Image: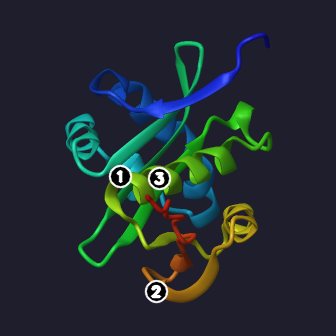
Amino acid sequence: MGTSVTISDASEQDAEQILKLQYLCYQGEAELYGDYTLAPLTQTLDDLRTELNRGRVLVARLGDEVVGSVRGTVDEDGTASLVNLIVHPRMQRHGLGGRLLAAIEARLAEDLAAKRYRLFTGHRSQGNMRLYRKYGYAQVGTEEISRRLSLVRMEKEAAPRAFVASA
């Protein structure tokens, strides 16, 4: 390809590309669950712009094109909620999802003092669960949303932060 993928903070100008990519990426999930009303498919551009101002949003870029994204917030107890990890279908299975996951975890620990990470995925989304397990997440619960969809809650503790002693 000649151009490498970079990961950086999303900007207001990325909102439209993120929303289009999100719509593309969630088509498979919608088909898997027989539900095209999943929140990522019905989110508006204004709602996404609001999210850009809360927590952290990262994008993966190939040149000027947004080919991946992930969002995260941290609550008052230090629990980071990670949502909408997406990678363009042509870029999947090359480690980009893992890079985005590691990057958002690092950013939330560094900037917002995250102590643990939590995310949700659909019960039939085996590829997602495989990725999350590979990065240390364990299933800690399941919530039935509808007859067709249960959300699997997965969590992991943040790595202990190293402290540098000063003389």
- 166 lies left or right of 49: right
Residue 80, percent from left and from top: 40, 67
Residue found farthest to the front: 167
The foreground one among 113 and 31 is: 113
Residue 26 shows in the view: no
Amino acid type of disc 1?
Asp
Which is closer to the viewer, label 3 or label 2? Answer: 3
**Mark linked to residue 111:** 1
Say what secondary structure mark 1 lies in.
Answer: helix
Q: Is residue 11 above or below residue 114?
A: above
Q: Which residue is mark 3?
A: 84
Residue found farthest to the bottom: 141
Q: Quadrant of residue 152?
A: bottom right
Which quadrant would the N terminus be assigned to in this image? top right
For the residue carrying disc 2, how many other residues have a C-alpha within 10 Å: few (<14), some (14-19), or many (20+)?
few
* Mark positioned earlier in the residue sequence (2 or 1): 1
**Mark linked to residue 64:** none
Residue 28, percent from left and from top: 63, 50
For the residue carrying disc 1, how many other residues have a C-alpha within 10 Å: few (<14), some (14-19), or many (20+)?
few
